[in-house]
């Protein structure tokens, strides 16, 4: 089983930045998929950024040019750098990883609130 723990959320003003972290642990061989999702109460969870091993990162149109996903393989950690934040980015952010064919369980998420 693979577990993840998200961190780095908080309250930020519009136009500000945050860097989220996702630490993966457990039965990790190599992470071949890493994705960041977000969810607003009453709405479906949305994939905002993802990357596969050796591939290009992909972004939802709503965050393209503002968010950047990256990873530290040595530490089994995935990051989401969020710049130029907007109030509509307010959500709980989750990450999910896949090691081999094993998907991680969902973590608690980290709350991001963009407000003045």
Image (cartoon, helix red, strand yellow):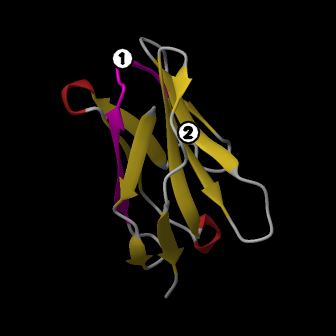
Is residue 72 visible in the rendered image? The answer is yes
Alpha-carbon neighbours of circle 1 within 10 Å: few (<14), some, or many (≥20)?
few
Is residue 57 among what the camera can see?
Answer: no
- Crowd band around label 2 with a 10 angstrom C-alpha radius: few (<14), some (14–19), many (20+): many
The one nearer the camera, 103 or 90, is: 103
Q: Position of residue 49 (x, y in %)?
A: 55, 39
Prevailing SS of the magenta stretch: strand
Q: Earlier in the sequence, mark 1 or mark 2?
A: 1
Q: Label 1, on which residue? A: 30
Q: Residue at x 37, y 63 (%)?
A: 17
Q: Position of residue 12 (x, y in %)?
A: 41, 77
Q: Look at 71% across and 52% down and name the residue there.
A: 45
Viewer-nearest residue: 33 or 56: 33
Task: Judge from the rendering whether residue 71 lies leftward or rightward of residue 90; answer left or right.
Answer: left
The percent position of residue 101, horizontal first and vertical second, equals: 55, 16
42 vs 20, left or right, is right
Q: Residue at x 69, y 67 (%)?
A: 40
Percent coordinates x, y for residue 2 in the rendering: 43, 34
At horizontal 21% and vertical 33% (from top left) the residue drawn is: 75
Compared with 21, 77 (above or below) is above
Please determine whether, in this image, residue 67 is positioned above or below residue 27. Answer: below
In this view, the mark in front (1 or 2): 1
Residue 33 drawn above or below residue 62: above
Task: Give the secondary structure at mark 2.
Answer: strand
Discs 1, 2 touching: Cβ within 8 Å: no
* Magenta residues (range): 17-33
Q: In the image, is residue 16 part of the stretch drawn in magenta?
A: no
Q: Quadrant of residue 79?
A: top left
Residue carrying label 2? 49
Among the 4 quarters of the image, the one containing residue 87:
bottom right
Res 24 → quadrant: top left
Q: Quadrant of the N terminus?
A: top left
């Amino acid at each position: 089983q693979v577990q993840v723990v998200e961190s780095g959320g908080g309250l930020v003003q519009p136009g500000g930045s945050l860097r989220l972290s996702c630490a993966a642990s457990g039965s990790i061989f190599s992470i071949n998929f890493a994705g960041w999702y977000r969810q607003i109460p009453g709405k479906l969870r949305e994939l905002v950024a993802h990357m596969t091993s050796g591939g290009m990162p992909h972004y939802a149109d709503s965050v393209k040019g503002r968010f950047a996903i990256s990873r530290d393989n040595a530490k089994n950690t995935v990051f989401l750098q969020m710049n130029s934040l907007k109030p509509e980015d307010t959500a709980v952010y989750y990450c999910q990883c896949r090691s081999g064919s094993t998907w991680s369980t969902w973590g608690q998420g980290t709350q991001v609130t963009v407000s003045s």
